[in-house]
Amino acid sequence: MSYRIRRAGRAEIPLLVRFNQAMALESEDKPLDGPTIDAGLQNLFDRPSDGYYLIALDDNDAAVGAMMLTFEWSDWRNGRFWWIQSVYVTPTHRRHGVYRALHEHVRRAALADPEVCGLRLYVERENRGAMATYAAMGMAETHYRLFEEEFDRT
């Protein structure tokens, strides 16, 4: 099966909310608040310089996957990393090349932009399937660990 990749539009926000909720529940057993995700997506669409979503469509134009790209400037490399985030593929389309189509689309675009110095993503420690997929796409685990401090703004 072939997949068409395109930028998501505001009309897909309800779909992206559902995809994000499903992904968080599956990968982290974490329920996410729909209105919060909706507001976050609205803000992303208002600020395209922060990032954007891609949608994978099957031969019937049904959305079967999505990923978000965000950007990080690296002074060490004088370039920009593109971060792959919020990846979701519908269960019936997993292991059918949806992620590969999304990843290859992003990789081609990144290679065509002389300012981009690489692709990055983070993955749950126990998600061995995703790690194998990322390795098969040519990505390598780094020696960095991720630390964060979340602020409760509610």
Image (spheres, grey):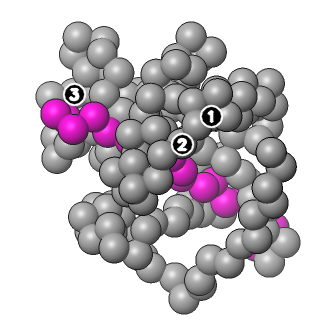
The residue sitting at 63% across, 54% down in the picture is 82
The stretch drawn in magenta includes residue 49: no
The numbered dot on residue 32 is: 2
> For numbered disc 1, what is the local secondary structure?
helix
Q: State left or right for residue 152 relative to residue 24.
A: right
The N terminus: image quadrant: top left
Label 1 environment density (alpha carbons within 10 Å; few <14, some 14–19, many ≥20): some
Could you tell me how far apart the alpha carbons at marks 3 and 1 are, in whole angstroms? 29 Å
Residue linked to disc 1: 37
Q: Secondary structure at mark 2?
A: loop
Q: Which residues are magenta?
A: 77-93
Q: Are marks 2 and 3 in contact (CB under 8 Å)?
A: no
Q: Main secondary structure of the magenta part?
A: strand
Crowd rating for badge 2 (residues with CA inside 10 Å; few <14, some 14–19, many 20+): some
Q: Nearer the viewer, mark 3 or mark 1?
A: 1
Image location of residue 73, percent across then percent down: 79, 61
Location of residue 46 with respect to 90 vertically, above or below: above
Q: Position of residue 95 (x, y in %)?
A: 16, 47
The reply to whether discs 1 and 2 touch (Cβ–Cβ < 8 Å) is: yes
